[in-house]
Image (cartoon, rainbow, N blue to C red):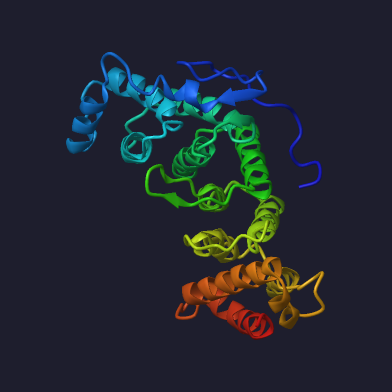
Amino acid sequence: MKNLYLAGMLCLSVNLTVVAAEQNNIKAQEVSQSCLSEHWSKSKLIALKASDFKVDNPREREQLALQMLNCLAHPDPELRDGVAFESLSKWLRGNLLKTEIAIQMLNTLEPVLNTKIDDVNGIYQPFVALVLAELARVDRKSPYLTEYQRSSLLKEAITYLIYQKDYRGFDNKLGWRHGIAHGADLLLQLSLNPKLNKVQLDSILNALSTQIKANNAHFYIYGESKRLAMPLVYIFLRKEHTAKDWQQWIEKVIVPLPLASWSEAYNSQESLAKLHNLQSFLYSLYAIIKNSKNEVLVSMIPDLEKAIKIVR
């Protein structure tokens, strides 16, 4: 990382009611108030979902896509997850939004990722991360970002994951938050991009390592470990790293400090949480690569099996 990412944020294209970037505190409730409009009520959006989000008029689809960005802050999971995210994902994956709209979406959402948010529900930023992952996917499939824009997105994605402290997952009323998993999904899409260099990939590996054990005595229970493992797998599949790189990375991850060994973890809740999360990560990674015939993944197994034996 060091001085890889200089310069400030991109100039925002301020659209709809999303709060301008120069403000220090975004209020998720205010953003969510523009999720619905006179033309697009909740019932009409639900009906649109039933039609598989078919909007024939390109201009109307683009305007609705921008409106859906506000729904990412909405406390109703039927609107936030079921309509906003699903519609944006479908349109982006189906190449149904112009490049200019994708850039406008990126310029609107990227600054939200690490801005101070007034959001008691903790839902806005995780879903911003998830849509940014879709925008990053478009870029790796059909590049539309400049090197600076891509590096800026990577920097924000790494910062978001490293400093993530909200580990809430699913709630019966609010649905998903899943900040760690969504942050890992964003890094996965970036790690798959052939335009990223080895130094940038190393910065992703470092970011992943900071959240494998979690913090605040939190136990992962919502599949976060597998989501954290996926970017790592695809980074090493790129063959830009050596066997020595892998060995050094995994050895660093399993260090029990401040404990002398993992056998001491059974004396505190915080240490037990870290042990649980690390074991979950190692087992998830093992399940992904154990039966693979890929020579790179096969070569990783001995060091992984050694790590599993140590972390007990």
Which residue does the image show at 37% across and 49% down from the upper left?
172
Q: Nearer the viewer, residue 220 or 96?
A: 220
Q: Nearer the viewer, residue 6 or 45?
A: 45
Name the side, left or right, on which 14 lies relative to 65: right
Q: Quadrant of residue 117?
A: top right
- Relative image position of residue 228 (x, y in whole percent): 56, 60
The residue lying furthest to the top in this view is 38
Which residue does the image show at 62% across and 19% down from the upper left?
11
* Number of marks: 0
Which residue does the image show at 48% across and 72% down from the upper left?
288
- Relative image position of residue 61 (x, y in whole percent): 30, 24
Name the side, left or right, on which 10 lies relative to 173: right
Is residue 128 visible to the viewer in this orientation of the structure? yes
- Relative image position of residue 175 (x, y in whole percent): 39, 45
Q: Nearer the viewer, residue 207 or 120?
A: 120
Query: Vertical placement of 172 versus 234: above or below?
Result: above
- Relative image position of residue 249 (x, y in whole percent): 71, 68
Which residue does the image show at 54% across and 49% down from the upper left?
193
Which quadrant is the C terminus positioned in? bottom right
Is residue 55 visible to the viewer in this orientation of the structure? no
